[in-house]
Amino acid sequence: MIIRVVLALALSVPPVMTPANTGPGACPVPMPERTNCGFLEVPERRDAPERKIEVGYAVHVSTSANRKPDPIVYMSGGPGSASMQLTGFLSQMFPDRDVVAIEQRGSRYSRPVLSCPETAQAMLGQLRQPPADIADAANRCRERLREQGVDLRGYNTKEITADVIALREKLGYASWNLFGVSYSTRVMMDVAAADPGGVRSVVLDSYLPQSVTWYDDADRNLSDTMAGMGVKEPFEAMVARLNRTPARVPTTDPLLGREFTALMSGDDVAAVLMEGLQDAQLSEVTPTLVRALATGHDELLRPLADAVGQGLVSHEFGLYHAVQCQDEVPFNTFTPKSRFFTVNGDKAVCDAWRLPQATPVPAESAPVPTGAESAPVPTSAESAPVRAATKAPVYVIGGEKDPTTPPRTAEPAARVIPGARFERFPRAAHAVFLFDACARERIAEFVGDPAATFAKPCSHPPARGVGALHVTGRPYQISLSPWLAAPFALFALVCLFQLVRGALKGRSLAAFGGLAGVAFCGLITESVYTLVSTNETALAVGVPALAEPYTWIAVASAVLTAAALLYDRKWPQIAATAISGGFLVWWFTWFL
């Protein structure tokens, strides 16, 4: 349940950012002007308040002449994901309001930081043979944190909720608008219930109801997502093929900085996709990826294996597991045993840590509205916490392609909230607001007037799709080792030289050969640039399908270049012919 925050994503006009610095009010990451950062001192455990910890936060003050008195307070998901790096992004969504980004206790910009490289390393070690011992790693992490004075029992949703309320009181806002994503939607719903006088409205993106048994639902959620994409049969074929014969995939351990060979079964790939599909860009190219893997394109597994390591360093694992072990794992049955190594890894950590389960939250009863499209919200054991109700206006959004918090569970749970409205976005996945301009427009409109209905469609047109792809893993390899593109660069330079030389000397065959080569290189470059500007993740799967017909322009260039040898047998033309032929061999046998 980790949100992959895409910092490169920008709105129409990027904010002016000031670099991170030191001193009072300084921020650990670049921030827009008129932003200060600080720490909220709170008890590590409010039932044993002697030890204090610090929760990081950032406050951006709006410069609008129509500045509203109630700010937006935002928290990222995870658990364990950082929040304040999105302050500039949010300040553009809400230019007429202050923006407060609050960290979770124990996250990257709070103190202490509950990193747990031991368990992160062991999670990645599930792709090694023999697999790493996660329980041993968890115990080593807990012992190290205990020596630092950390009590993991203080890192749970109940305490994080109290931190949000305490920050409002410290900053002196009479009320504010809550904005949660994924895991933090649980936090924000608890805040709304516990601090009703301080909450004007609530936005829940990728809603994760407390009543949902996330681990038990994970397999079904992924299968439903694949079916919705129209690739259920290829997905099952891919999983079965790789379960029979796991693939050996070179990858890098980001914690050690060393390469190793991962052994990936079909179930391992499914687990990685379950996490990766939170990214709307990967979601868009997943049908092509799955069909290619089903037919044996194992070279496409390298970016998936690399993504495992990158995900393990994107959040603080000590905090993640402290929350999961108290607020999520105890309310799942894990029957039958999950096929996802990520799910089994979380359970192994929790079995080792033996943290107490969360206390149920009392709730006001609310009837399920008549006419609801879905079945009642699935629940686990009767002891599972129940989300407390709120009377503040609530706007819930979900992505149609989200396997983590799918509309199947989010929508009926949202309809139980009195006065809430739910909207699904058909091309979106997880953390909708990060990737969908229409969602950002809707959220801003709701916060502007929570009681109003949306009077008109979004003004932002749907994003352009990536189009058809020619499947190849070579662009990703080139992104890791740019020198692998040397044959393409050399061919482009030789063609340009041949065009100029042929034109100056009046040798039409050579000139046209060079012109065709330059045209080919330009068309390929333009098509790849367009693809990257639309969806940079697509290059991990292939290149635009137009690369195939464009190839015949390169063939024509090589033929014309060779034909020019009939009239020019000097070394420049001989070299150009050899390089053109060598490029075609490289293009057909390696790149395509």
Image (spheres, rainbow, N blue to C red):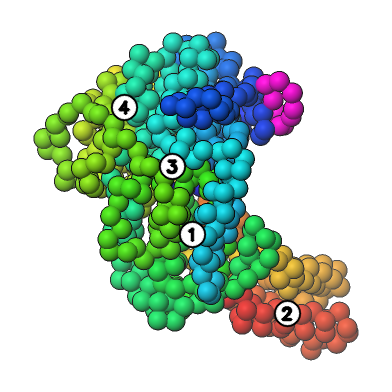
Label 1 sits on residue: 135
Label 4 sits on residue: 394
Q: Quick check: 473 left or right of 266?
A: right
Label 3 sits on residue: 323
Farthest residue in the left direction? 370
Between 540 and 406, the residue placed more toward the observer is: 406
In magenta, the rendered stretch is: 18-26
Badge 3 local density, few (<14 within 10 Å), some, or many (20+)?
Answer: many
Q: Earlier in the sequence, mark 3 or mark 4?
A: 3
**Residue type at the position of mark 3:** Val
Give the main secondary structure of the magenta stretch: loop
Q: Residue 362 is drawn in which quadrant?
A: top left
Q: Earlier in the sequence, mark 4 or mark 1?
A: 1
**Residue type at the position of mark 4:** Val
Q: CA distance from mark 2 to mark 3?
A: 59 Å
Location of residue 200 in the rendering, given as x and y in whole percent from the top left corner: 37, 17
Q: Residue 176 is drawn in which quadrant?
A: top left
Q: Earlier in the sequence, mark 3 or mark 1?
A: 1
Vertical arrangement, residue 81 with respect to residue 452, above or below: below
Of marks 3 and 4, the one in the foreground: 3
Label 2 sits on residue: 580
* Contact, mark 3 vs mark 1 (Cβ under 8 Å): no
**Residue type at the position of mark 1:** Ala
Badge 1 local density, few (<14 within 10 Å), some, or many (20+)?
Answer: many
Q: Residue 293 is drawn in which quadrant?
A: bottom left
